[in-house]
Image: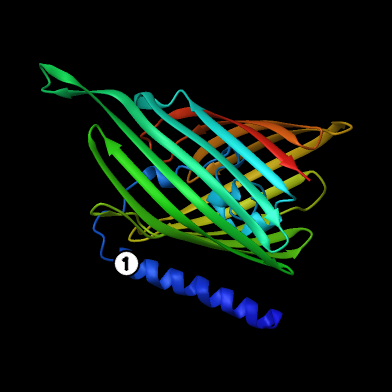
Amino acid sequence: MTKIMKKLALIALTVFFCVLGYSQVSIADDNHAFPMLRMGVGARALSMGGAFTAVASDATAGYWNPAALAQVDKLSISTMIAANMANDRKYNYAALAYKFDWGAVGFSWLNGGTSDIPYGTSEVKSGTFDANDHVFLFSYGTQMEKFFVGANFKVVSMKIEELSNTGIGVDAGAKFNVNDKVDLALAIGDLGTKVGRNSAPVVFRLGGCFKPMEGFLFPVELEKIHNRTNLKLRLGGEYSYAFADNYVGALRGGVNDGHLAIGAGLQLMNQFSIDYAYVSEATGVFGENHRISLSFNMK
């Protein structure tokens, strides 16, 4: 099979998944289901307003755009914890990606929940219960010259006290390296994702990343959630500076649908990174909180 035929086959497969997922969720009457799937991961990404679909090139690409996993150098590991979330919620994340000659594979885990939720009447509390959700992503991405494609197989597990449900879904993504200064990307999330009787809405993200000069990076992204009329606009910026051999610092800022985010990062020995983000959740449910990420990238 020629390179052109391989490219056409992968594009056709991506379109097929999109049509399949769209047809399955178009009848869903609740397009606000499973907000944890859309909260974002990685302090670097979130400090730039979540405009990361065209930027991701490490293990976090499994969440943002699986096509970009093919840009992992060799091995990439990323983690994140959230602090000071409203309603005593927790939100954690870990991912790894490894690149082979035939493409890159990745695994991601997201966990969110709340403990000791009171129940009963407004006058008398009868007790407490726990809620705990898990999302597992099994990802693949490959490169064909300047074009990247990828997909996720997703498993979602939700448990409230003794009640639990598990479901599956698919994500798809593509990325195009226009030149050294411009990248374009498209990601389509939650194709047919359904847990129990509830379906997650399909999410479309179209992004660009512009690098006008060394050290500067400006991503922009539009997000459309199926059955919602409004478009979400995300804008971000990053300035990085090598202040010593193998040590790079970065300052970041962004806007996520009108909600500001800021952050900073430090890269050590071109392999280890620690990043911080201060974010205000666009949904308003989780309030202002902090995200801290530790990453490792082997070249």
Amino acid carrying mark 1 in the image:
Gln
For residue 292, side relative to residue 242 (left or right): left
The correct choice, above or below, for 170 with respect to 41 in the image is below
Q: How crowded is mark 1: few (under 14 residues within 10 Å), some or many (20 or more)?
A: some
Residue identified by numbered label 1: 24
| Residue 181 in sight in this render | yes
Looking at the picture, how far across and down is residue 160, in whole percent? 26, 35
Q: In this view, does 252 lie to the left or right of 164?
A: right
When the figure is inspected, residue 82 is found, relative to residue 154, above or below; the finding is above
Foreground of the two, 190 or 74: 74
Residue shown at 58% from the left, 59% from the top? 140
Q: What element carries label 1?
A: helix
Where is residue 28 drawn, in percent x and y? Answer: 26, 60
Q: Is residue 90 left or right of residue 63?
A: left
- Tell me, what colour scheme is on the image? rainbow
Is 68 on the left or on the right of 247, as rendered?
left
Q: How many labels does the image show?
A: 1
- Residue at 49% of width from left, 73% of height from top? 15
| Residue 113, above or below 58 | above
Residue 131 percent location from the top left of the image? 30, 32
In this orientation, does residue 52 appear? no
Residue appearing at x 13%, y 23% in the figure? 120
Indicate the quadrant where residue 255 lies: top right
Q: Which quadrant, please, contains the N terminus?
A: bottom right
Closer to the camera in the image, 117 or 39? 117
Farthest residue to the right: give it. 245
* Residue 3 quadrant: bottom right
Q: Which residue is drawn at 36% across and 32% down?
A: 113
